[in-house]
Amino acid sequence: MQRDVFAFYAVQLHLLLRWSGGRAALIRRGLMTAAVSILAFVATIVLIPGITVRQDPAVVLAALVLATLTALLRPVLIGLLSPFSVILVAAATILVQGLAFLVLARLPIGLTVDGPESAVLGSLAFAVATAILTAGLSIGDDNSFFGTLVRQLAARHRDTARTDRPGVVFIQIDGLARSILEDQLRAGRAPNLARWVRAKDMTVDTWQPLLPSQTSASQAGVLHGNNDGIPAFRWWEKRGQRLLVSNHPADAREIMRRVSNGDGLLANGGASIGNLLSGDATRSYLTAATIDDPARELRRSHVLDWFFISPYSFVRWTVLSIGEVIKELVQARRERGGKVEPRGDRRFPYPLARAATNVLLRHLTTALVIEEMYRGAPTIYADYVDYDEIAHHSGPDRVEARDALGGLDRIIGLIEKAALDAPRPYRFVVLSDHGQSSGATFRQRYGKRLEALVAELAGGKASVRGATGHIEHLGRMGALLSEGSRIRGLGAGLTSGPFRRKAGDGEEELPDVVVAASGNLAHISFPHLPGRASREKIDATYPGLIDGLVRHEGVGLVLVRSASGGPVVLGKAGISHLAEGRVDGDDPIARYGPYAATGLGRIDAMAECGDLVVISMLDPASGEVAAFEEQIGSHGGLGGAQTHAFVLHPTTWRVDGPIVGAPALHRQIRRWLAAEKAPVESAPGRT
């Protein structure tokens, strides 16, 4: 028993030294803790009338005793009680400190406590004041924040069996193109990733997301090995006469039902964090497809309790979120003052969405990844969405987006450090699901949205519903609300109405035309025309619509089925017959890259494909596109960097050939995992 106690505190001291930065830093931290405790005790005396001090030294002595007692007992209480509830840990801490108040009052040091009630109230006040002061003094210190969490997790999972069999942490940086990553590495703005590459521990390879270049298709392919039937981020389905939106919980669950065979990448003990689809994970958090499914979204998590209930954590992320909102307002004003073009829509609620992704989701996701490493999860897949969200509004290579990447690099360094003391060694894979292409939006360039153009070309009498609003942030905030509230489905309930309306899904009667946009890709559907409407049927019903779209300056190509010739891609100076591989005139697909025809053919083969598929113009020199959504950094279609994703993986893991399509990346990862049988000897950061 004595040996177990000694080993327990030896681990705690080891972790304290690692995360403090050495002995000198630990001494400085000890002095700060003493000062905080004294200030917290003074606040307690002021707030609780039943506690008085007759001699000034009593303040110092009592504060130091309480701080020492808390430091020694709290890890034990976490280890014993946190499997039941963090609230129980807090309650036990308050009771122990309350007893300490009563004991101190019996000593001849000048402290008076008028009864058990005052002792408990004093203990509560001291604990809250200590947490608030500590959080305030360490707002910018991620090592202090996550070091505190690591020590708690080490106590809670002290009995987790250790193994030499390596696990893998997949870190998805949503929306990051390989070219932007390489610029970041060369400029020294990603020192942790650059260190891995320079040391030749890791190498960067390209993979090509096929159309549609967006998260639900990429994650379905990577996590489940199947992304058939996902033609866009949102699309109209004639079978159910409804709009499907990838990050709406009910729709994400339906998408996963279609693509999952129960044996996804994260089956058999894996964890999904912050994703759209779960990869059949055993434990799933902040994941759209499982967020309101009690059978899949497991809520027993020390991190979720600690993150939203602990005053220390709550104060820290609240202050950082306010700072992020202020930072966004200042940067947006500077952008307007500098007449930077193009400019995205940065009005509210975007500043709140930026704070949610850049602070709350980033830190909560990281905390959950660390918790899963201390559980010993064999595979962990986490999606960091902050870069993608910021790049949509400010552009993929602007200072705001680059700052977000620098922050993510620091987070990766923290995860790497946490892995050093996990119960198993971990390999790391950093990847993106797609890139982003920049450019002024379709509305900014031509003064109208695509649905307005369609309404004009359809003769003005057809009812046209546009599904072109930016709604990715609503899904992310809904997941955060649901986890934070701990009330199943609350996030979906709070955002469902605004989410559906913003996405373009109204309750009015069935429209004649639905225009569903995903970046510079749009599916145009005619709900009253049964099945896949042919070019001939559309021309007969809406004369001039297809020809008008093809002629428009902002449209690069239009895909439609011909009753006689199958799928054809129409451009201003030529036609590509996909099924025959024949081109009349100039090939309208050629400028969009070597895999554009494959992607268009793949979407055409889906039953869920729109009657018309429209891709915006592309400037081949700059890679700029004209998004149909109000995003100056966009993805979902073709053109520019949006189809150039990356995977950063251990150098010893060889790529067998070009990785074209997310299912191909899934198969490559499966081969890597199958070959990974020996203990890790040189994984990045492991000693």
Image: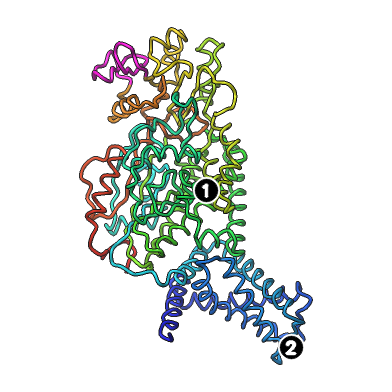
Label for residue 391?
A: none
Mark seen at residue 110? 2
User: Is 507 within the magenta?
Assistant: no
Q: Residue furthest left?
A: 656
* Residue carrying label 1: 357
In the rendered structure, the answer to whether residue 465 lies left or right of residue 183 reads right
Is 662 on the left or on the right of 389, as rendered? left
Disc with the residue nearer the chain's start (2 vs 1): 2
Across and down, in percent, residue 573 comes to 34, 14
Identify the residue at image location x=41%, y=80%: 7
Quadrant of the image containing the C terminus: bottom left
Which scheme is used to colour this image of the protein? rainbow
Crowd class of label 1 (few under 14; some 14 to 19; many from 20; radius 10 Å) = many
Q: In the rendered structure, which segment of residues is drawn in magenta?
A: 560-588
**Quadrant showing the N terminus:** bottom left
Q: Compared with residue 81, is residue 547 higher up or lower down, i.e. above or below?
A: above
Residue 569: in magenta span: yes
Amino acid residing under circle 2: Gly
> Which residue is more in the foreground, 584 or 473?
473
Task: Residue at 43%, 83% (x, y): give it.
Answer: 6
- Compared with 304, 337 (above or below) is above
Secondary structure at badge 2 equals loop
Q: Residue at x 23, y 63 (%)?
A: 678
Q: Position of residue 243 (x, y in %)?
A: 49, 29
Residue 154 falls in which quadrant of the image?
bottom left
State the residue in front, 203 or 341. 203
In the image, 215 versus 137, the foreground residue is 215
Pinpoint residue 29: horizontal percent, then vertical percent: 54, 74
Q: Is residue 558 visible?
A: yes
The kind of residue on which mark 1 rests is Thr
